[in-house]
Image (cartoon, helix red, strand yellow):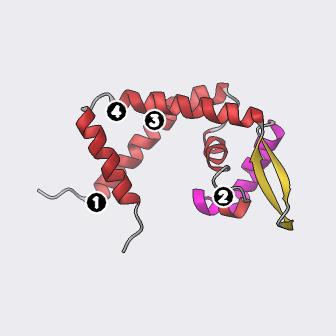
Amino acid sequence: MPVDAAQLWTLNHRLLTVVMDACSAELARLGLETKEFFVLAEVTSSPYPAELAATLMIPKASVTVYVRNLVAKGFMRREIDDADLRRHRLALTAEGEVARDRALAVLATEFDRRLAKISPHDRTELHRILLALLEPAR
């Protein structure tokens, strides 16, 4: 019997939601809201606000709010881009790096708790499958 693609997508989304919900209290202790965590985790790879919004697939206005909050908390700073003085580049502060690393450790621990339910072979296969699904469509 074939597996329904929409059902697989829904199960994957539910898993991610359950893991993030399980981490939310610890993220709050670190001073982070869940969506702020995603911004904090991605800003090094996508340092420009518009790029960050596109990468995270969230509205630019939301990125502005999250960045403002993270700057106020001392986790992030805005810098003038030397290549284009009209642009702001986002960077993590030392405190932001610590918060990001701790939050990622919390997430990894919670997800690892879920992954412990499957065999090492299945974990390897899941890794391979996820990488394949993330490849650009041809």
Quarter occupied by residue 74: top right
Q: Are marks 1 and 3 in contact (CB under 8 Å)?
A: no
Q: In the picture shown, does residue 91 fall above or below 52?
A: above
Q: Nearer the viewer, mark 2 or mark 1?
A: 2
Q: Are marks 2 and 1 in contact (CB under 8 Å)?
A: no
Spatial separation of the CA atoms under disc 2 and disc 1: 28 Å
Question: As shown in the figure, which amino acid type bears the numbered disc 2?
Answer: Leu
Report the span colored magenta. 53-73
Residue at left offset 58%, top offset 27%: 25
Q: Are marks 4 and 2 in contact (CB under 8 Å)?
A: no
Residue at left offset 67%, top offset 49%: 44
Question: As shown in the figure, which amino acid type bears the numbered disc 4?
Answer: Leu
Q: Secondary structure at mark 1?
A: helix
Quarter occupied by residue 62: bottom right
Q: Are marks 2 and 3 in contact (CB under 8 Å)?
A: no
Q: Which residue is mark 1?
A: 5
Label 2 CA crowd tier, 10 Å (few <14, some 14–19, many 20+): many
The disc placed on residue 19 is 3
Q: Secondary structure at mark 2?
A: helix
The disc placed on residue 52 is 2
**N-terminal-most mark, 4 or 3:** 3
**N-terminal-most mark, 1 or 3:** 1
Question: As shown in the figure, which amino acid type bears the numbered disc 1?
Answer: Ala
Question: As shown in the figure, which amino acid type bears the numbered disc 3?
Answer: Val
Q: Which residue is mark 4?
A: 115
Residue at left offset 39%, top offset 41%: 15
